[in-house]
Amino acid sequence: KGLLGKVWDDQMSSKMLGTRLKKVVMNYQAMNKYGVDVSVPSSLSNRPKLTGPELLCQLKDKVEVVTLTSDLQPFSSLPWASQLPSKQLTSDLGPFRTCAVVSSAGSLHNSGLGKEIDSHDAVLRFNTAPTSGYEKDVGSKTTIRLINSQVMASDEHRFLSSSLYSTGVLVAWDPAPFSANLTQWYNKTDYPIFTQYQRYRKLHPLQPFYILHPHFEWQIWQRIQDNMAEPIQKNPPSSGFQGTVLMMSLCEAVHVYEFLPSRRKTELCHYYQRFFDAACTLGAYHPLLYEKNLVKRMNRGSERDIYTHGRVTLPGMSALNC
Ligand code: C5P
């Protein structure tokens, strides 16, 4: 038998996880820290399963990349409003022809994918993922870096002073309460995204820096839940999937690397750290398992591309005829 059975199966379920991870996922499913209040139908398993093209059109129709601008309440009445961009990320940047999304997975280690990744018109990286010293495997071009508010706030990552963050366009997100408006979120962010944003902008005023509207993360969450046969974690999707949808909005074609693990699949969490945990690939806090099911269903590339390159091919929203 060929590659099938070796690459990601789009019906992955929390039932297939080990005992420890299963428990963690169940805890998150019960916790509901962000007050997700959607009624998930009790008969999830006999809903019609959408095809790849149908899923892509649903994503295009129901998810919109919106970033905070200086004219939005409550920011427009705050003294630092002018630090926010005046225009949307999607009107300032792109469109690009080809884009690469580089997951931070340990399976990028020894992949030799660097040249291929750098050949794209734009490259998206995540959080604290470095290129320096890892160029052979992950390339050296960084057009956009998507970071979460936890990275921005932690002393360990030296967000304000490290040169890691100084290349490309920065885009940040924070887990917001599910039905909060911007004022409610502003008063109840998960991590201090706004104080850190203001500090960073003062130190690096010329670097473009956007903040995602929290509707974006929850619109994506809803697409995942609506297309899964079981309840998913009531937490925002991972940076990896948010970044994939972001690039689908800026590019004609998107290659995502090692989000669906290749033959190099490993419990090594990140290509840049000696830390092992299956949760990095399968998810615990994030509904990562289900994000991967959805990406597998939308993939237009081959099983072999996944197996050898960890590569998924997705169309940009502009290339879709819905
Ligand atoms: O850990 P971090 O969030 O910075 O990694 C960036 C993204 O790469 C994750 O949000 C996840 O989508 C993806 N990832 C993965 N498998 C791993 C590590 C990261 O799919 N082992």
Image (cartoon, helix red, strand yellow):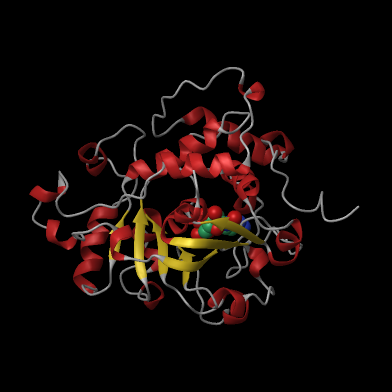
When asked about the image quadrant of residue 145, the answer is bottom left
Residue 193 position, x and y percent, is 29, 54
Residue 246 spot, x, y in % from top left: 43, 55
Task: Give whichever of 273, 133 is nearer the camera.
Answer: 133
Q: In which image quadrant can residue 27 be found?
A: top right
Residue reaching furthest top? Answer: 42
Describe residue 156's horizontal placement relative to residue 76 as left or right. Answer: right
Viewed as shown, does residue 178 lie left or right of 228?
left
Q: Residue furthest front?
A: 321
User: Given the current orientation, which residue lies at the most extreme right position?
Assistant: 1
Residue 257 or 174: which is nearer the viewer? Answer: 257
133 in relation to 20, above or below: below
At 59% from the left and 38% from the top, the residue drawn is 24
Residue at position x 60%, y 33% from top? 228
Give coordinates of residue 217: x percent, y percent: 41, 44
Ligand 1 lies in which image quarter?
bottom right
Residue at (30, 69) in percent of width and height: 160
**Up-down: is 65 above or below 141?**
above
Q: Residue at x 46, y 42 (%)?
A: 220
How many marks do you count on the picture?
0
Q: Is residue 6 visible?
A: yes
For residue 92, what is the image quadrant? Answer: bottom left
Q: Position of residue 9 (x, y in %)?
A: 73, 45
Residue 103, can we see it? no
In the image, taking residue 310 as reference, residue 203 lies left or right, namely left
Foreground residue among 180 and 276: 180
